[in-house]
Image: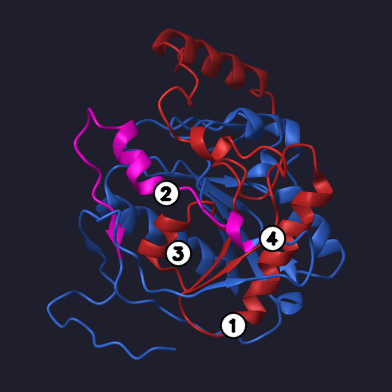
Chain colours: A red, B blue
Amino acid sequence: MTSALDITQAVKPPRAVFVNFPLGHQTGKPHQPELQRRIVADALRAFETIAQAGTIVELPYVWDANDRSWEERDYTKGWMPVPPSPEETDAAEAERRARFAKPA
Amino acid sequence: MRARKRNRKRRPGAARIRELDPERREAQSVVRMQSHGPVRPTAANMPVAYIPRTRELYRDFTPYRWVVNDTVPWTPLRKPVRECRLALISSGGIMYRDQPRWHREDASWRRIPKSARREELSIWHFGYQTRDAQEDTNCVFPLERLRELEADGVVGELCDPAFSFMGGIYSARKVRDELAPGIVDELKRAHADAFFLVPA
């Protein structure tokens, strides 16, 4: 599964499925299980349809038919949130681990 | 499949690592699938070039040496997906409950129980915008969707556990020589027929 066509073309996996969504959404948008499911099912179908090594199947899904500005912004300066400080990272990590400390 | 001559000087399977020329167009077939879903006009097919963007974003760092493979491995899938044992792997940095987070150049991986609930999963990754995936890990780790597809018979059996690592690893050598073989061992132990890899 890929959203970075140029990187996948360089790596050349045996089979790949490309969806033109911003990075971090390779299998769909949040809280849209139907869309996620269609993307994953389409990708699995490619296991059976791709017969030539290196083929990349492009899925026809569109992130936003009326606004393609994400393509200009994605993975550019200012696109990533400001990273938390090491102290904030450690505190968030401690909180998460404490929250789940009890067995499932 | 195209017949390609192997470079005998190189260890079989070893990737050549070099700076990729962003202008270079790779000769590779991209098949557009139009059998279902909304069909996008051809003129709109302008995927983002992430290699030059990565170079720009990390311009203050030593340039990343992109993995460029000249050959494509191929193992035929000998049965339909509905009869396969399928493993899920994501490089999106998914953690189950109190599993430890990753650190820089950390090539370890986490085993995520197949039965994990969404609220038991969280994400640590410095290299992509994780906001949406934190909200709904199915954006990069479609465990719930694959469980549904298994229940519906689309997938033969989803392997337990699924796997995740944090893909922001500078050393391609570390990925090739440590991470990849480790996960391959896991897949062999799980008797997986195929894996679904989601690089985030």
Same chain? Circles 4 and 3: no
Which label lies toward us, 4 or 3? 4
Q: Which residue is mark 4?
A: A60
Residue B164: x and y in percent read 53, 47
* Amino acid type indicated by mark 3: Asp
Residue B185, which numbered label?
Answer: 3
Residue B33 lies in quadrant: bottom right
SS at mark 1 in the image: loop
Mark 1 or mark 2, whichever is nearer to me: 2
| Residue A104 in view here | no
Magenta span of residues: B42-68
The residue closer to the viewer here, A15 or B124, is: A15
Structural crowding at the residue carrying mark 2, measured as other residues with C-alpha within 10 Å and reported as few (<14), some (14–19) or many (≥20): some
Residue B49's tag is 2
Give SS at disc 2.
Answer: loop
* Alpha carbons under labels 4 and 3: distance apart: 35 Å
